[in-house]
């Protein structure tokens, strides 16, 4: 057990030391302090408040309902330092810890939504080439669970977001792990507080890849199904299964 814990700690050190966003070429990327790591069992690890379920390929963390009265939203989940005035949920966690969970489960970030920037960080009008394998591996689902009158309830994050109307739910479909980036030694998702964005945001760890993601006028909190403000919820991110490696041919 101690050996496994040491290996995990070394892996985390490596992730923090080498975390970069090549297209932005950050200057003097600083090493972040490793988070508190707790091994729950053989398949479960906790990094700060973020729990990794390796066997099920899920990542979970606590949050609270921040809006529920038909308001327009741009963000789905932010930290307390983020855009709380326009976010459905607030999660008091570290974006670095959440990003580390994705890295430990070998989930690649997809940059397909955002233009390549030049050396002065201006959009070039060109988008990066992203392989179909990466696009598929970076697509995730986000579920929610909470207690209501001592009864466990569940929904998808999509269920709580209205599209063009408070009654019409966002189309079911995946979210995209885009990975955020480092710049001048700062991890942008950590400093901005952006965890999951509906309206596309480059600093966010996760973005909605669907239609009208660049329109900030069409997304609302649903008028039903969302519990009262300050209700505690558990956010559960489900990752796709890792690709199956082809077995080497057997000799006859």
Image (spheres, rainbow, N blue to C red):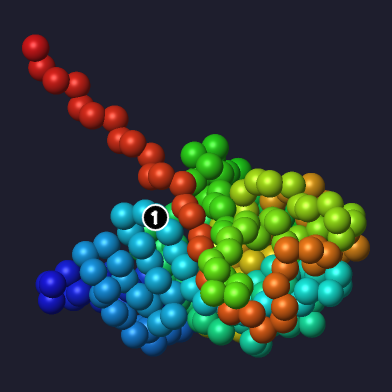
Q: Locate the N terminus by quadrant.
A: bottom left
Residue drawn 38% across and 66% down?
52
Q: Locate the C terminus by quadrant.
A: top left
Q: In this orientation, does residue 114 appear?
A: no
Residue 124 image position (x, y, % from top left): 75, 55
- Marker count (numbered): 1
Residue drawn 65% across and 60% down?
157
166 left or right of 228?
Answer: right
Residue 10 image position (x, y, % from top left): 25, 74
Q: Nearer the viewer, residue 247 or 93?
A: 93
- Mark 1 residue crowding within 10 angstroms, few (<14) / some (14–19) / many (20+): some
The quarter of the picture where residue 191 lies is bottom right
Residue drawn 20% across and 74% down?
5
10 in relation to 244, above or below: below
Q: Residue furthest left?
A: 252
202 in relation to 80, above or below: above
Residue 147 image position (x, y, % from top left): 56, 73
Residue drawn 47% across and 68% down?
60
Q: Which residue is mark 1?
A: 57
Residue 226 image position (x, y, % from top left): 72, 68
Q: Residue furthest top?
A: 252
Q: In this orientation, does residue 149 appear?
A: yes
Q: Nearer the viewer, residue 140 or 193?
A: 140
Q: Nearer the viewer, residue 135 or 174?
A: 174
The quarter of the picture where residue 120 lies is bottom right
The quarter of the picture where residue 186 lies is bottom right
Instruction: Tell me the SS state at disc 1.
Output: loop
């Amino acid at each position: 057990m101690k050996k496994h814990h040491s290996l995990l700690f070394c892996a985390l050190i490596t992730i923090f030391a080498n975390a970069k966003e090549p297209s932005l070429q950050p200057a003097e990327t600083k090493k972040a302090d490793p988070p508190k790591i707790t091994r729950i069992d053989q398949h479960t690890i906790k990094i700060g408040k973020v729990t990794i379920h390796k066997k099920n390929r899920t990542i979970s963390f606590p949050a609270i309902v921040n809006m529920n009265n038909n308001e327009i939203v741009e963000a789905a989940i932010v930290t307390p330092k983020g855009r709380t005035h326009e976010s459905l949920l607030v999660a008091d966690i570290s974006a670095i810890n959440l990003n580390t969970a994705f890295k430990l489960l070998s989930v690649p970030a997809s940059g397909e939504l955002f233009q390549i920037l030049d050396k002065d960080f201006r959009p070039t009008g060109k988008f990066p080439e992203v392989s179909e394998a990466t696009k598929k591996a970076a697509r995730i689902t986000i579920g929610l669970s909470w207690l209501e009158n001592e009864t466990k309830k569940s929904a998808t994050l999509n269920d709580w977001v209205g599209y063009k109307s408070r009654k019409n739910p966002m189309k079911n479909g995946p979210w995209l792990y885009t990975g955020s980036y480092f710049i001048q030694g700062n991890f942008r998702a950590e400093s901005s507080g952006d965890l999951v964005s509906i309206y596309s945001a480059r600093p966010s760890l996760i973005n909605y890849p669907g239609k009208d993601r660049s329109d900030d006028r069409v997304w609302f909190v649903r008028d039903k199904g969302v519990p009262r403000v300050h209700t505690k919820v558990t956010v559960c991110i489900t990752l796709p299964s890792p690709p199956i490696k082809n077995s080497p041919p057997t000799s006859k």
